[in-house]
Image (cartoon, grey):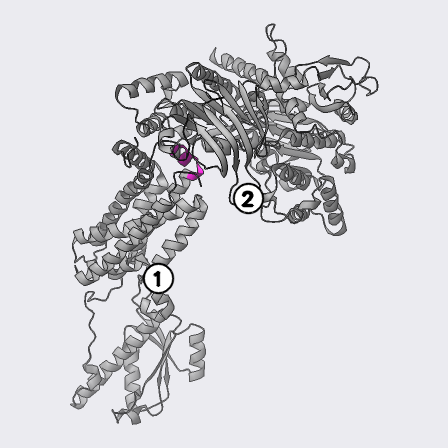
Amino acid sequence: MNKIVSFRRLRALCRKETLQILRDPSSNIIAFVLPVVLLFIFGYGINLDSTALRIGLVLEDTSPEARHFADNLYGSPYLQVTAGLTLTEMEQAMTAGKVRGFVVIPVDFAEKLKRPADTAPLLVITDGAEPNTANFVQNYVRGVWNGWLLQRAVERGEAPPADIAIESRFWFNSSAESRNYIIPGSITIIMTVIGTLLTSLVVAREWERGTMEALLASPVTRAELLLSKLLPYYVLGISSLFLCVGVSVFILNIPFRGSLLVLWAIGTLFLGCSLGLGLLISTVLRNQFNAAQAALNAAFLPALMLSGFIYEIRSMPVLIQAFTYLIPARYFVTAIQTIFQAGNVWTVILRSGLFLLLAAVFFIGLTALKTRRRLE
Amino acid sequence: MSDALVTIESVQKIFTDSKKPALDGISATIQPGRITGLVGPDGAGKTTLIRLMAGLLAPTSGKIRVDGLDPIHDAAKLRESIGYMPQKFGLYEDLSVQENLELHADLRNVVGEERSATFKRLLDFTDLARFTSRLAGKLSGGMKQKLGLACALLGQPRLLLLDEPGVGVDPISRRELWKMVQELIDQGITVVWSTAYLDEAELCRDVLLMNEGKLVFYGKPSDMTSRIRERSFQIRQISGSRRQLLARVLRSHEVMDGVIQGHNVRLVLRAGAAHPNLHDINAGNQAELMPVAPRFEDAFIEALGGGPGGESALAQRLRPVTGETNTAVEAVDLTKKFGDFAATDHVNFTVKHGEIFGLLGPNGAGKSTTFRMMCGLLTPTSGTARVMGIDLKTSASQARQKLGYMAQKFSLYGSLTVKQNLKFFSGVYGLRGEQQKLVVNEMIEVFKLQPFLDTAPNTLALGFKQRLALACAVMHEPRILFLDEPTSGVDPITRREFWTHINGVVEKGVTVMVTTHFMDEAEYCDRIALVFRGRIIAAGTPDQLKDQASTPQHPDPSMEDAFIALVQAQSNEAGS
């Protein structure tokens, strides 16, 4: 009688799958060339650290204090200051994208400065269309401001103002280089492409070429079919994960503070989600073109945009923020960034791991339910 | 019969996305140790029935038993006793011959000594022993077919289900496969062979003839053909146009069906009808009426209610093409290479005005590639393609205005409605305003498309799609019509109807080039070129080609016999 999993059949199917992967140039490119290319693009091409942000300056006060502060703004290596425009002109310049934001030093700047208890004498307007850049503008201007206040207090022999006692220091990424968190994040994208896009294509291809029909007419069981797709692509995905880690650490010099074992465990869970989703898509759609479209929309784009890998989740609308909790890539991004930069922080890793486990069980389970031993 | 291997009892299958049943009340049995043909045009339900037997689909109602088992509930057990070769053979093209065999052997638990013995036996049987390390994707169509069969035979099935194994494969491989299947029958294996070729049906022991989900006939093919015994004739020694004669003859009430066969016209009379008077139909003084053997196809046409008649409403509306004297189409050393593979290799032919010229050959022989170069859709690697004296390399668009092209699978816009397709294609060819409206309305009338104007072509039956595609290709009154596999998969009545139009437009002076892999369809052409592996191996009138293959033992060969003889002669020449 037919066993649920026959080792011989499963081995034969896995062998077939492996040969196909090795002989298909596009699988090899997706699994091994694409990750390296992507890492280099993310590593060198995308840089979220802004040097020389273009900002405007509207100087309404001509007091020595105002001029002095303006000089400090000019002197900042992070800012490229345009001045000499009126407030309305400056607004237009920002609308046109010529400046990322602007600083207004109001007429009563020097007056208000004398009364520290009063409201902040400085107005900073930023272009909220790009929240990330806007944050940078705000922070850099604040940095210059705090620096200037401190310098001024020291020059006058006064105690430094209370609010600049707050000193921001970046932990875990002390040089605050965005590369250090973008690269671990981009590994998520690579895992998604391999796990979901590649798998969804291969199963759909079997349907299109009629080989699935031949398999279904043989004594193959449902469990064997499912496992024979999961196992080879799991091995491929994990190899690619460690390839990425190797390239990141040894070539791109990204610090790695966690343990490889933990990374492997988290990677396994995330691949479980990705592979499960990919198999689910192709099992339902059975057509390479549709499967690719669906994989792109269901996995790749959310992983790119909603995982917090590039775009800050906290600056998204509340509804979308809530939605990101459903995206496995979000948890993997958090986990892998933590493993790279902070080491094995168990609360983060266990929380992410638990969700990834649930999602993997959900997707693979649903695929198992949808996998039919018949054609409809 | 209780000893049947498969019993099918009033089986109905309705797919969720369509209202019309794919199978509608089929009852039949398949007897052990025989070959049973599942015969019918595309959409007849052949594949659905085979899948039901293989347990790949569940019937909506009715009962199927295979080897005493229910294909759905006892699926696991049943799979050990059936071999199934799906359409396109179900091979992994990126695995080698050996790897494909090993996979299927493992799946069917063929191990140890049995395994090596089986491999040896199957590789000898299929003559693939020399190619074990070749990737399946690099095999020819015939070799793929044999490998597919070998894979399906692993595990020693009692029932072998073959879904359209002969489609598009060259006739030599088709005959070899047929011989192999005969050997299997002798070993006691039961074979179900589905096919759209009606000549294959005649070779089966039993036949299930199907059309649009219904069983038209079940029994011995000879029982079917004997229905029209002594009613098939050929009119030979015709003087004057045989196409006009065919049209005249089909007008007479006694004639049920008629086709062109080389220089002759083949007729099937209605039951009990008197012989037509050759003088009345103006066949010429030398003309004679010779009785010929009935064909399965004739009987099928009768079962479907008789042929469609010989008048082409399309041709009646066409203005005659006159004043053309030079060659219509010319190919000089036409070569197209894809990488290092020559899809066509120094192809030469000329087509005169007002003739039907056919390119005949199996799938992958290079017919469509030649065609696309003739229409200016592909640029030749070397050589010249001329249409009405215009070189397609330099002025393709000028030539295209004069030609109509009907692509394989009919290339219609599936999501536009029928009317929008007509408007679009007439617009593409520069018809505007009142004239466009007039032409579109004419086409609707000629091809009886009125009821479908707001339907998308995707949901139409194949026959209507074909009509619409023809309408789209002729609206601008082209001088030359290119038809790429125009009748592939349609039922014989629709095919007759189509050729009636083609015969009609040719009589008006239009030149027609057609590709086909139906050997008997080649007989409708004035001249044909046999295409094999990218080269033209012979050209001439159908009768000339058949004469070349005629031997004292076999004085009246079919087109397929001729093709095989010519291919073999060619390879002997190359070998010596």
**Tag nearer the camera, 2 or 1:** 2
Amino acid marked by disc 1 = Leu
Residues behind callouts 2 and 1 on a single chain: no
Badge 2 density bin: few <14, some 14–19, many ≥20, Cα 10 Å = few
Estimate the x, y position of residue A354 in percent, counting from the top left.
24, 57
Report whether residue A19 is seen. yes
Residue corresponding to mark 2: B18
Question: In the image, is residue A185 above or below residue B81?
Answer: below
Q: Which residue is mark 1?
A: A306
- Image point (27%, 52%), residue name: A270
Q: Is residue B338 in view?
A: no
Among the 4 quarters of the image, the one containing residue B211: top right
Q: Can you tell which mark lies on residue B450?
A: none
**Residue situated in front as seen by the camera: A255 or B438:** B438
Identify the image quadrant of residue B108. Answer: top left
Which element carries disc 2, helix, strand or loop?
loop
Q: What is the CA distance from the residue labelled 2 to the residue labelled 1?
A: 40 Å
Tell me the residue at 20%/84% (across/down).
Answer: A150
B333 vs B96, nearest the viewer: B96
Magenta segment boundaries in residue numbering: A207-215
In the drawing, does residue B258 fall left or right of residue A18? right
Q: Is residue B535 above or below residue B373?
A: above
Q: Residue furthest front?
A: B2
